[in-house]
Amino acid sequence: MKTLKYLMLGLVLISWGCKKADDFLTKQPLDQFTDDTYWTSEGNVRTFAYGFYPTYFPGYASGFDLSWGGYFSGESLNDDFAPTTPTTFVKNVPASGGGWSFTNIRKANLYIDRIKIVPMSDEAKKHWTGVVRFFRALEYANKVKAFGDFPWYGKVLKETDSQELYRPRDPRAMVMDSVLADFNYAVANVRASDAATGPQGLVVNKYVVLAFMSRVFLFEGNWEKYQANNVAKATEYLAAAKMAANEVITKGGYSVAPDYRKLFNSLDLSTNPEIILYRKYQTGLLTHSLQSYVNKEPQTGASKNAVESYLCKDGLPIGLSPLYHGDKIISNVMTDRDPRINATFVPAIRLNGVVSNYSSSGYAVLKFFNEDIKDLTNGNSSLNDTQAPVIRYGEVLINYAEACAELGTLTQSDLDISVNKLRKRTGINMPNLQVIGGQPAVNGAVYDDPKRDPSVPSLLWEIRRERRTELMMEGFRNDDLKKWKKYQYLDTQGNPDINLGAWINRSDYPKTLSVATQNNAAAGYIVPATKAETQRIFSDPKVYLSPLPLDQIKLYKDQGVDLKQNPGW
């Protein structure tokens, strides 16, 4: 606790920048750190880095924070969930806030500047500079994802640097080039391993950096390809994502874990071979509520669209496979399918009026639930201590496959070291995905999903399917649809299957349930969102970027700077 006390005090003092010139203060305080006295050892530098961890490695969050770090319904603006009130697109420009801030950027730049004066080896200085440049890269990647163009600051500014403080936004690609430079520096200088583990088991090493690099530049490469139509930048960033993933695959020493569910519901992830970085929870210190929510509380259920995305166990889509049993009872839905469906969803329909822990769609999530502690103290309320994967090897594998596919270079060898590793996980054992003549195939036979979006090539469609099912409920789907320019998938009128749940025999269940009764393909399926005003309509591409808050536009204007609002807002 003393370390945390000093850490928080140090962060507050350092966030002020240089010490205040109070004439009456002739001595530094003896009972607390100041900016002048803190930077004296590598241990202090390490402790300062811990202040970044909660922001970028939230895990399952903490307490009753229902964002759960983006896991489960913590990220619900997607087509995987079918809620009674769908999450809507941003409609109004905020008066203030909205994520337009520079706090973490300033903190990172201060850190980089202060490391130079710490008495430690050059290797240590390069390592910690690499660590903080990694954090700065993550912060800027998030800002660019939200706002597009954003001011780049690579050094500490003083309050008197008004010309630098208030200047127009830098172009997105220029900022991301700087982010790439930060990642490249971190890859070259961050230690491959660090014996000193940080709080909650967190520690940044070279392979953590590379794994995140594959994530960040897969997103940005796709954005440049589909949103910006910049082929050169798309190729550069996708190549960076592929390189980073390949480094983890060939040199990281990780492997696919034998049990898919234990990646998400375990009390100990320290020895799991697939975990690159995880957040540790411990009773009395840090706990969360995700386990309790998927066990005992009513939950937002999965959409019919999401459930139907899983292949059958012969490797074919449900529209082509002779093994598909239909969806009129839950056992049919779950039988002879990609076993990840059984590891993700409950093998029973949970309905409002029948059980207390019902699902809005009837399909309930199992993925994060640990049956062994469901009746124990640590399995209830906000006292859950199951460990959270922050980034895992399975994601890196699918990042690699997608980067190759988007670059147009995907080979069978690429599939065999990525997608097919995931398919051969113990208990999954799905047929290998093959590529024949540029088309997806299984057991030597080319196929084409009849439900494929015709604007997406068939092989890429299967890679995107694999990504969706492998990473289901892990907080990626909205970003994926954003980078692919596919927000039309989120429109509940244009894509009605995302507002349908399980099929039920109407006479067997409470009349309070809303079930489609019209004589069409939707008849008999639960309809979670029934009111016209709750439908989610995608009508304006402006929502791919967030609006800048009004107070910032005015603040810049008062300084004579035109801080341009994002298009359409």
Image (spheres, rainbow, N blue to C red):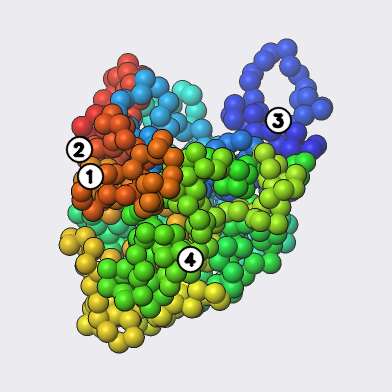
Counting residues from the start of the chain, the first of labels 2 and 3 encountered is 3
Residue at (30% x, 19% y) in the render: 557
**Marks 3 and 1, how far apart at CA:** 63 Å
The residue beneath circle 3 is 9
The residue beneath circle 1 is 518
Asked which quadrant contains residue 432, the reply is bottom left
Which mark lies nearer to you, 4 or 3? 4
Could you say which disc has been placed on residue 56 in the image?
none
**Marks 4 and 3, how far apart at CA:** 46 Å
In the image: residue 8, left or right of residue 206:
right
The residue beneath circle 2 is 539
Q: Amino acid at mark 1?
A: Gln
Q: Amino acid at mark 4?
A: Arg
Counting residues from the start of the chain, the first of labels 2 and 4 encountered is 4
Counting residues from the start of the chain, the first of labels 3 and 1 encountered is 3
**Marks 2 and 4, how far apart at CA:** 34 Å
Q: Residue furthest top?
A: 24
Q: Amino acid at mark 2?
A: Ser
Q: Position of residue 190 (x, y in %)?
A: 58, 60
